[in-house]
Amino acid sequence: MATARAAAGADLIVAALESRREELIAASLHAIQSRMSAYRQADAALLTDVRGHIGEHHDLLCAVLRRGRPAAGREFGFVGRHAAMRARRGIALADFLEAFRSYHNVVWDAVVEASQESREAAGEALEAARTVIRHIDLATTEASAAYLEAQQLLLADGDRVRRDLLEDLLAARAPGTAAALAAARAAGLEGDVRCVLVAALPNSAPEDEGVLRLAANALAMAIRGRNSPLAVTRHGEIVLVRAVAAGERALLADPLEKACRKVASQGVDLAVGVSTVQDGVASLGDAYREASLALGRVAETGGVLSLPDTSAFEYLTLREDAVARRMIAPEIERFVVEDREHGGALTRTLLAYAAADLNAKAAAEELLIHVNTAHHRLGRIAEKTGCDLRRLSDVIDLLIAIRLTDASS
């Protein structure tokens, strides 16, 4: 008898839900758009897909109620197609599930209304509520799993496309696929656009490559321009390629250093090198070599070395050059080594003196020391090296020695 009553109640609910199918679908779509801006801004194609998705869920719920047993997992196969579209359109999982709940709220109200149509049938109709609740729980679980699977496939596919695009760009080839061409356009990397390349390495390889991808995203967000940079993780390294607008100075050191501090707080210490600005994507192979050179200078200590933020003089002394080292006078090399062993006060004074255009007073103010102390230190440097610090050529010889000695230490 109880089974017959439950069946009668289910029939009543099913009849109501089936007769109101289009009305309930429209009400659900309206509720979804009212509650979430992502759907209010959706185009016609996405809204058509949402409407179809609601309709398929509605029909499955009616079938479950009519037969009185839960849906099998295979009956939710249609969810994957719709979840994939949401992921491609950038709809977040939270919004995807919230849309799902919006439909269920509309359906639940319809079930309650159906149970009140007849006093005699009210009790029997509400018996079917358990089936509805169980179906909603199962459907939500299946929808969440389908979305996450679609998102992972999308991420994997996107990573592959970006890696292939980077390989094409570094080899001065045109993008090899339509997907790669679209990714290049999205990053603004076409033709003779000016661009800069960033290479980064963690101080130790993370166990989970997802950690490296999060670090890449943080760096990309920090240097975002008109377009999001192409961001790729490969072979344990991060490579970013950023388009540079006409007239823009690509001074990326400060934002990259801030991003590195943020990433370090999450357990990943990075060393970062930045290339000079290139005139066109065809030069990105050279840019990668430049960024790798800069990265090599900070690989052990960490931090950022950005060539656009570096003077030509500083760049020329980045490389370990045996010929240049042999050209340094022995007394100058000995002075640099001994001063470093004693804390480097004289070297710091010389660098401040050079940065102040050979103005001892300005150097003293920068170092927060008395001008007499600055003159005394400069005198000691001249005495130890035999250089005349009033002559630019002698100062340059000292600066080169300091740079090359630092580079080899």
Image: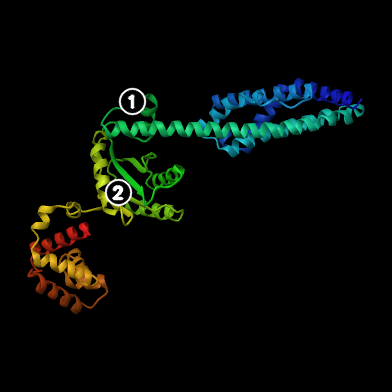
The colour style of the image is rainbow
Could you tell me residue 216's position as x and y percent? Answer: 40, 44
Q: Is residue 42 visible?
A: no
Could you tell me residue 213's position as x and y percent? Answer: 43, 43
Q: Secondary structure at mark 2?
A: strand
Mark drawn on residue 176: 1
Amino acid type for the residue under numbered disc 2: Gly
Q: Along the horizontal axis of the image, is 135 left or right of 188? A: right
Q: Quadrant of residue 11?
A: top right
Cα–Cα gap, marks 2 and 1: 27 Å
Is 209 or 80 nearer to us in this picture? 209
Q: Along the horizontal axis of the image, is 255 left or right of 46? A: left
Few, some or many residues within 10 Å of mark 1 (<14, 14–19, 20+):
some
Looking at the image, residue 356 lies above or below residue 231: below
Q: Along the horizontal axis of the image, is 111 left or right of 358? A: right
Looking at the image, residue 347 lies above or below residue 154: below
Q: Secondary structure at mark 1?
A: loop
- Residue identified by numbered label 2: 273
Could you tell me residue 15's position as x and y percent? Answer: 80, 21
Q: Quadrant of residue 161?
A: top left
Amino acid type for the residue under numbered disc 1: Gly
Q: Quadrant of the N terminus?
A: top right
Kindly identify the residue that appears in the image at 10 percent across and 53 percent down: 323
Mark drawn on residue 328: none
- Work out whether mark 2 precedes mark 1 in sequence or the reverse, and give the earlier one: 1
Kindly identify the residue that appears in the image at 13 percent across and 67 percent down: 334
